[in-house]
Image: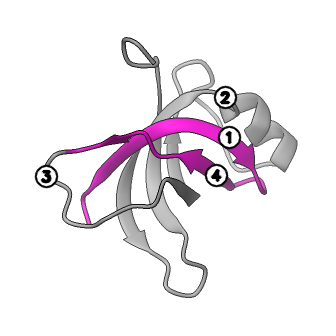
Amino acid sequence: MGDGIGGPVINCLSGDVFEMSVTHFRKDNKEQYDVLERIQISKIDNPDEPQYQEKTKEDLERALKGKFVTCNVMYRDKKTDRLVCNIFVQRPPEGF
């Protein structure tokens, strides 16, 4: 897809799946996204924890829950309706 979305992580479902409140969209996105999306992690870039690898739900919660992330959307898994994305942990935007 190549689209980009961003928002806070509100819930972790497993060691590599979380729910995100989608609050930011790239202007040139080709697809539409729901207010709440389930994200399957393909790759994660977190400057606070650069060596993060899929572990447990609790590990993912410590790494992401409540943080603002941006997602480079690779594709939507048709079976699970999850977005498969590369994840980047960010500082929240101004006024967030």
Is-magenta flag for residue 4?
yes
Residue 64 located left or right of residue 33: right
Residue 10: give its label.
Answer: 1
Q: Label 4 belongs to which residue? A: 19
| Percent position of residue 81, x then y | 54, 77
* Mark positioned earlier in the residue sequence (2 or 1): 1
Q: Determine the CA span between mark 3 and mark 1.
A: 25 Å
Place of residue 7 in the rendered image (x, y in percent of width and height, measured from the top left): 48, 37
Task: Establish if 34 lies above or below 79.
Answer: above
Could you tell me if residue 56 is visible in this image?
A: no
Using a 10 Å C-alpha cutoff, classify the residue at mark 2 as few (fewer than 14 neighbours), some (14 to 19) or many (20 or more): some
Above or below, 48 against 33 in this view is above
Q: Nearer the viewer, residue 24 or 86?
A: 24
Q: Are marks 2 and 1 in contact (CB under 8 Å)?
A: yes
The amino acid sitting under disc 2 is Gly
What kind of residue is marked 4?
Glu
Label drawn at residue 66: 2
Extent of the magenta region: 1-26
